[in-house]
Each structure stands twice: as C-alpha cells, then as structure tokens.
Image (cartoon, helix red, strand yellow):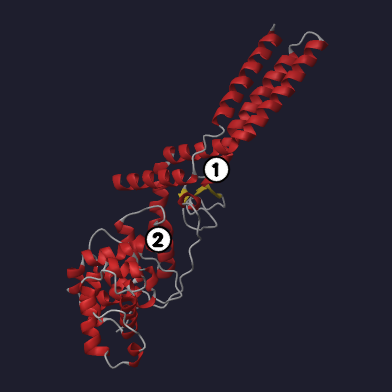
Amino acid sequence: MNKKKTIILHPPLRTKYAYEKLKCCKYCQSYTVLNEEKCTVCGKSGLRPVLEKARHKAKRTQYNDLLLTLFLTLLAILFSQTFQLMAISAGAGVLLLGLLYFVQRQALESRISIELSKLFQRERGQIAAGLIRNLETAAALEEEGRSYEMMREVAVIVHNDHIRKLQIMLLQSFVLRKDMELELEPLLLEDFDPELAAYIGELAKIKRELIKDKTFQYVIKYEQQILAMENGKDILAGVAGATIRLKRYVLAYSGFIARYARRLSKDRFLRLYRMLAESPGLDWGELSAETARVYEEKYQWDADFQQIKPRSTII
Amino acid sequence: MVTYGCLTLLFLFVIVKSILYYTRRTHIVAPQELDKRLLKLINDEERAL
C-alpha cells in the first residue's frame, strides 16, 4: 500500500548569504530563521534581519560620538566669557561636527560589517538556541510539508546529519514530482542511509539534473549496501542513467556505468551509444566493450540505433 | 579656562575619531567572510551542545 502523501512544497526564500535569513526580535532578542510574522517567544511583531540590527548598533555608536561632540561644543559656548570666544566655540563646534559626520558616513558600511561580525561572535549561543527552537517547532508540526520547509530553512545555517536525516525521512513520505523544489547535494550524509539511497533513486527518475559528482561518489562508495537493498539495482541503474547527461561524467564514472549498462532504459542507452560512437578516440575503458555487448544483444535491430553511424570499429 | 579646555578636548576627540573612522573605512568584512564566520560559529557551537 502506498502511504506517501501528495503535498505542495513552496520554493524557499533564496538569499545570497545564509546570514541574511537570520532575524532577531528587538523585544526579547531571540533569533529565528523561519519566515514568521511574529516572534514565537514573546509574540510581538519585532523581528528584524540581523543586518538591520548591526546597522542600528553602528549608527547608534556614531550618534553617540556626534552627541559627545555637540555636548563639548555647548559646554565651550556656555563657559565662554566673551562674545568673540562664544562665536569661535560655536564655529569650531559646527565645523568639527560636520567633519565627524562626513567621516562617519564614509565609514558606515565598514562599521556595520564589523558590528555584524562581533554580533555573531557575542551572540552565538542565543543564535544556536534560536535555531534549535526553530527545529523543535518544525519537528512538532503535524503538517509534514510545512515541517520540511522549516527544516530546509534551518539547514541553510545548521549543517549536520541529524537534520539531513529528518529531511530525507520527510521527503520519503511525500509523492515527489518534477515540479517540486527539491535538493540533493545538501542532504548527502557521511554514512550510508537506505532512505537517502531510495531518495536518490527517485530523483534519478524525476530530476536527474540534481545528481552530480558528490552523489555519484556517494553511490559508488556505498554501492554494495545499495545492491543489498530490495530495489538496489534499479537505483544504481537510475544513477548510471543520470551520469549519461554529460560526457565528462561518462568518462569519470565509466566503470560504474559499465556495471549497469545492461539495465539502462532504452533512451539512456541510446544516448550512451551515441556518445561513444561520436568520440571513439577517448578512453572509455571497459565501457566500450560492455556497450558493444549490450548493443549486440538488445538493440542490434532497433531502428533508432541504425541512424547512428559509428566512427569506431569497437561498436 | 573651561572654554579652552573644552575646545582642546573637542579638537582632540574629533581628530582622533576622524582618523580612526577614516583609516577603518576600507576595512569591510566581506559578506562571504561573514557567512563563513557565522556557519563556523554555529556549527561548532551546535557540535559542542
């Protein structure tokens, strides 16, 4: 019985840098990466990006310098015994205030970046606590699609196998579709995980463009464990089919493809056959011989293969 | 005398601050570096918990 759920995954809010996702409540100083309207800790609408917090702090430091300059100017005016000295004090104050303001404006961006760096260092415990709270919120949700979306946001900053496994488990409970915003490389684990292998197998069918070098290396590393799975051979054949997107992949993983060339679908094998026929001079290793064998056995009389003019005698 | 003292202090303060602001104006921590620092801090902290 198929227990998988049909859900709609919303695309993540993409930011150029991970820290741009981080927000801080100006009332209770708690952090979050979730796209929330109100702070989940104090319930107030005081969430603002960390960059804005750093900008606020940098500007406040600069205002304090300006205020001190103004205070010294006023003090000098107040204690002036003649009008001439009063005018000199006022003129000097205005001039120096102008100079300080001008230099401060020049240095604002630098000051903000330094404040932000200090903020990360100073408040790393609170940031980590906020992210753990976000993860707990995501895990407690009954709506699995939303839960996955939240975990995906947290995983932008927190990189560990625990979150990756939770994400894979959730993904494996969904009916995956081509139009979904899926990811693979950020979910690759250190160790073998059958759920991850099954997920890779599904992506090989619906979104093979997500399967890249790191995934090929993961699959080859745990090939024996995947083979021991119920549909392990199908997963490996799917991944082998995904390598046939680029000549570079075929050259790099020719031994792996050769082991599963027999199980490739017709369209993938046709693509492989064409690739090899077009570049007979390249070193394809054992893949040439295996492709020739499969061709002889299964596709020798297939009309689609007849249109390809082999430039090599191997095929 | 107080006026002269205040004016001296004012000049010194503004000159020192201006020099500091001026010399540090190009010391911008690049966003990539900020990103790297945050990820390192959080993931180290998270491992320690």
Judging depth in this view, the residue of A44 and B24 nearest the camera is B24
Which percent across, then down, holds residue A290? 21, 79
Q: Amino acid type of disc 1?
A: Lys
Q: Which residue is mark 1?
A: A53
Which percent across, then down, holds residue A235? 26, 75
Name the side, left or right, on which A307 lies relative to B16.
Answer: left
Residue A256: name its quadrant. Answer: bottom left
Mark 2 and mark 1: span between their CA atoms? 24 Å
Name the side, left or right, on which A89 lies relative to A6.
Answer: right
Number of numbered discs visible in the structure rendering: 2
The answer to whether residue B32 of the structure is visible from this angle is yes
Q: Considering the numbered disc 2 on the image, is that residue within a helix, a strand or a loop?
A: helix
Tell me the number on the disc at residue A151: 2
Badge 2 vs badge 1, beta-carbon distance below 8 Å? no
The mark that comes first in sequence, 2 or 1, is: 1
* CA neighbours of label 2 inside 10 A, class few (<14), some (14 to 19), many (20+): many
Tell me the number on the disc at residue A292: none
Q: Quadrant of the N terminus of chain A?
A: bottom left
Identify the residue at image location x=78%, y=11%. Answer: A85
Identify the residue at image location x=56%, y=28%. Answer: B23
* CA neighbours of label 1 inside 10 A, class few (<14), some (14 to 19), many (20+): many
Q: Quadrant of the C terminus of chain A?
A: bottom left
Q: Is residue A89 above or below residue A28?
A: above
Q: Chain ID for label 1?
A: A
Which percent across, then down, holds residue A91? 77, 19
Q: Amino acid type of disc 2?
A: Met
